[in-house]
Image: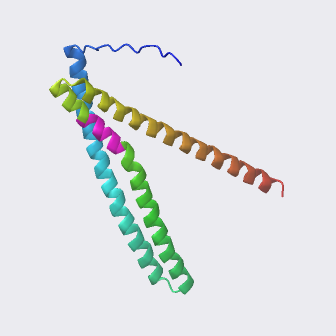
């Protein structure tokens, strides 16, 4: 039988200055989340129009193969934009939930809601951090690929 050390619970006291800073942070987080939702809306609208634009351009071209290619490209661009909107949704959602829960926690003086708000903030930063690492790895892969292509082209 394992014996776990007891976890001591303690109450964190926030002075009025700290509460004021958190209230202001909640307002800015909420504002940024609203801007994020508007940005997602623009991305979805761009997805709809990107598909229509590429399809229209394809039908205007004299070559039939180009028309079929641009129709497929329109569908691909629509899907890519919709995937970007879906990917962008999660950090914005976490930021919005952080702001909403923080406002409620400070208004009601509720420690559990405050903890929930910080959980959403943690999820927001975790998502952004993982996404940043993925993008950096993608950039590194592109740099390596371009370097190899440049070296191979120089050897000809």
Say if 51 sits above or below 83 in the image: below
Residue 127 as seen in the image, left or right of residue 114: right
The x, y position of residue 97, in whole percent, is 29, 39
* Residue 59 vs residue 121, the one in the foreground: 121
Residue 146 as seen in the image, left or right of residue 93: right
Most extreme residue toward the left, as rendered? 107
* Magenta highlight on residue 98: yes
Coloring applied to the structure: rainbow
The structure residue drawn at horizontal position 40% and vertical position 36%, both measured from the top left corner, is 123
Residue 106 as seen in the image, left or right of residue 64: left
The x, y position of residue 49, in whole percent, is 36, 68
Say if 103 sits above or below 84 in the image: above
* Residue 96 vs residue 105, the one in the foreground: 105
Q: Main secondary structure of the magenta part?
A: helix
Residue 80 as seen in the image, left or right of residue 40: right
Q: How many marks?
A: 0
The structure residue drawn at horizontal position 25% and vertical position 23%, both measured from the top left corner, is 111
The x, y position of residue 95, in whole percent, is 32, 38
Q: What stretch is highlighted in magenta?
A: 92-100
Most extreme residue toward the right, as rendered? 156
* Residue 12 vs residue 84, the one in the foreground: 12
The structure residue drawn at horizontal position 26% and vertical position 45%, both measured from the top left corner, is 34
* Magenta highlight on residue 69: no
Using the rendered view, name the quadrant where residue 28 is placed: top left
The structure residue drawn at horizontal position 50% and vertical position 71%, both measured from the top left corner, is 73
The quarter of the rendered structure image containing the C terminus is: bottom right
The x, y position of residue 31, in whole percent, is 25, 39
């Amino acid at each position: 039988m394992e014996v776990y050390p007891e976890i001591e619970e303690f109450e964190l006291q926030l002075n009025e200055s700290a509460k004021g800073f958190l209230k202001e942070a909640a307002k800015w987080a909420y504002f940024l989340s609203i801007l994020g939702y508007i940005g997602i809306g623009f991305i979805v609208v761009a997805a709809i129009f990107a598909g229509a634009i590429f399809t229209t351009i394809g039908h205007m071209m004299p070559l039939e193969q180009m028309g079929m290619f641009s129709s497929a490209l329109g569908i691909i661009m629509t899907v890519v934009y919709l995937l970007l909107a879906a990917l962008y949704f999660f950090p914005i959602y976490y930021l919005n939930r952080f702001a909403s829960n923080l406002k409620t926690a400070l208004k009601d003086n509720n420690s559990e809601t405050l903890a929930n708000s910080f959980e959403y903030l943690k999820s927001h930063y975790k998502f952004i951090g993982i996404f940043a690492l993925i993008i950096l790895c993608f950039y590194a892969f592109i740099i390596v690929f371009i370097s190899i292509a440049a070296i191979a082209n120089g050897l000809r």
